[in-house]
Image (cartoon, coloured by chain):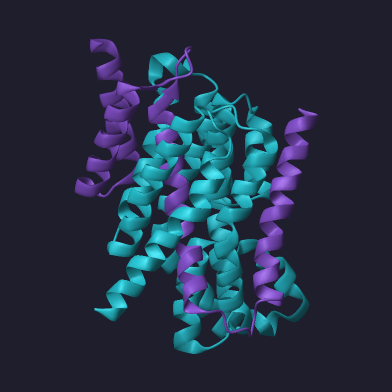
Chain colours: A purple, B cyan
Amino acid sequence: MINQLLFIGVLAAVTYASRLLGLTVMAGRNLSPAVRLYFNYVPAAIMVALIIKQIFVPSGGGHLVVSLPVLAACLAGAAAIKLIKKFLPSIVIGIATGLLVRFLL
Amino acid sequence: MNRNKGTFKKACVEALPLAIAIAAYGMSYGVLATQVHFSVLTAVLMSVFVFSGSAQLVAVAMLAGGAGVLSVLLTVVLLNLRNLLYGAALAEGLAPAKRWTHVLAFGISDEPFVLASARFKMVGPDPYYFAVVAGIFYIAWIFAALFGALIGGQMDPQKWGLDLAFPVTFAALLVPGLKGKPVIGTAVTAVFLSLVFEWIRPGNELTIILTGLIAPLAGLCIHRRELRD
């Protein structure tokens, strides 16, 4: 509990600092367009890395194995959000597909 | 007074549809947080004190994957870089709030930025509008997290597929933003890089940070090439 609270505290401080620094230190400065674009692309890269790390999981022998339920769930979730453009239903569709694949394997 | 009333109404009308979407993310976060052994209280406290969808979701996902606290924090710092841009862009519009800007800074994130920058362009500086919009999102985020944590705590993760909710949530967050060759190029490069890093050392803690640092450079290269063509 204490560790979690400490973690939350540090996370909150780091996040608030980024907000306040933007508002105070960065205001009025001319940032290069390249830096702006770079900052905008970072979240997509991190999300992809998080997804890949859950699809390709280390096996006991130190090799990577594909988790087919996770792969199927991600593909179904991605297709669903593209088609129906609604967040929660897409999550439900993704999870249901992953569960189905897990059941069939 | 009448002006404030009008601004309040306008902010509510414009924030409400987005607040519903934020509540959906908040609920997912609440469910996921309970899967990494956060209690309902700590899951909600994170929403109260951090109030950042991407930072919170990434943090709980990384903890679920066994990542260390330091790598989670470094990744969150990386994710928060865009707050610097949002803050810089909103500074002029929030300036009339004077010392209250430090409080308003807490509300800076994707959605308030989008609404407030559109508003400032139209009517000039308007910190009150920003405060109302951020306040609505904040309330929606906290209550949705509470609801999600209450539901999540009652479910067996394997039986209900809650372990699948992490990657699916990120896929659903990622796909709508994949517009334009630079972002798609960044995503494809991120797939390649994270696979390489994981292949070199399975379960590598640095995969997320290194991918987050390097892959956007590919997006920049593609953007520059597009400009040249």
The answer to whether B227 appears left or right of B66 in the picture is left
Please state which of residues B144 and B210 is positioned toward the viewer in this rendering.
Answer: B210
**Looking at the image, is B141 positioned above or below residue B207?**
below
Please state which of residues B195 and B35 is positioned toward the viewer in this rendering.
Answer: B195
Residue at image point 29% right, 47% down: A86
Q: Position of residue B209 (x, y in %)?
A: 56, 46
**Looking at the image, is B6 positioned above or below residue A43?**
below
The answer to whether A102 appears left or right of B212 in the picture is left
Residue at image point 45% right, 69% down: A37
Q: Position of residue A28 (x, y in %)?
A: 63, 85
**Looking at the image, is B123 positioned above or below residue B127?**
below
Q: Position of residue B102 (x, y in %)?
A: 74, 70
Is residue B57 in view?
Answer: no
Please state which of residues B32 and B12 is positioned toward the viewer in this rendering.
Answer: B32
Q: Position of residue B108 (x, y in %)?
A: 59, 65
Please state which of residues A71 and B83 is positioned toward the viewer in this rendering.
Answer: A71
Residue at image point 49% right, 88% down: B123
The answer to whether B31 appears left or right of B159 in the picture is right
Quadrant housing residue B225:
bottom left
Is residue B75 in view?
Answer: yes
Task: Give the position of the N terminus of chain B as an image quadrant.
Answer: bottom right
Q: Residue furthest left?
A: A83
